[in-house]
Image (cartoon, helix red, strand yellow):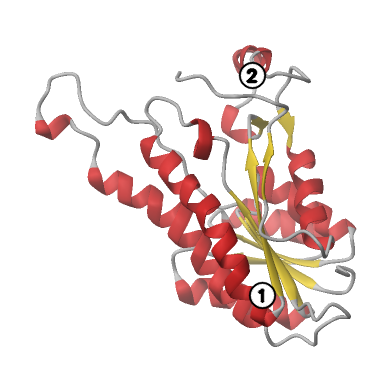
Amino acid sequence: MELNNTSAVVTGGASGLGEATARELSARGVKVVVADLNDELGSKVAAEIGGAYAHCDVTNTEQVIAAIEAAVAMAPLWSAVNCAGIGWATRTVGKDGEYSSAHDLDLYRKVIEINLVGTFNVCRLAATAMGKNTPDVDNMRGALVNTASVAAEDGQIGQVAYSSSKGGVVGLTLPLARDLAVVGVRANCILPGLIDTPIYGTGPQSDEFKARLGAGVLFPKRLGYSSEFATLAVELLSNSYMNAESIRLDAGIRMQPK
């Protein structure tokens, strides 16, 4: 699938995996809408790559449509990459055995709403816009890449909400691809392992913590780079024969219970 002279929406594009993907797409001649809630960082990234910024809550249909329309205004929308998401660590039951100390149900719903429902919201709307494109030689009109996590398969203690949400993203991949085949849109999913993003902070303590995490990786024994996620995401977009796949990007790690 040709990416040059097309547009893309990247959610969570202001930092981390999303930022790296937005920059990689821009380097391939794509006009990128950086969709995020961080106006300062999002505007900065968009300006540096010659794209556009859209303040976007992925669960807000009107804001997602606005981000998509901003992309369409620059060039035909052929790509959407979902990197927006949140994490949460809480055990299912509390230590005191009281009902009140069990996992907060509203927090569980929030993680599911953003990570899973938000991902699907972007997919359904982006695919609708892509369906208006003139098809290429393969009768293709676009492609989606969603971000899950190895926690979808190796969820650790305290990750019930996060793992549930990411397992849902993996689970929607095949039926989503089957649904969208009729309009010529592919859908794939990446399950990142331990990737070095701003979530780990900076400084000596952060470096020591990341080194300990990296020691548990099979090979190479380090955290992944955001650029490694980005190049895989772009390959999934551009390779016309990649469809309905969920790919672990984790250097062989299998997460332990804690």
- Does residue 36 show up? no
Left or right: residue 215 versus residue 168 is right
- Label 1 crowding class (10 Å Cα cut-off): few <14, some 14-19, many 20+? some
Residue type at tag 2: Lys
Tag shown at residue 192 = none
Residue under label 2, please give it.
Answer: 210
Is residue 219 in view from this perspective? yes
Residue drawn at the location 72% of the way across and 61% of the way down: 243
Q: Nearer the viewer, mark 1 or mark 2?
A: 1
Residue at 77% of width from left, 58% of height from top?
A: 242
- The kind of residue on which mark 1 rests is Ala
Quadrant, the C terminus? top left
Label 2 element class:
helix
- x and y, in percent, of residue 28 in the image: 89, 60
Question: Quick one: 132 or 48, which is closer to the camera?
Answer: 132
The residue that appears at 85% across and 81% down in the rendered structure is 136
Image x and y of residue 133, in percent:
75, 85
In the picture, measured across the screen, residue 47 lies left or right of residue 157, that is: right
Residue 181 numbered tag: 1
Who is closer to the viewer here, 47 or 221? Answer: 221
Please tell me in which quadrant of the rendered image residue 211 appears: top right
Q: Earlier in the sequence, mark 1 or mark 2?
A: 1
Q: CA distance from mark 1 to mark 2?
A: 41 Å
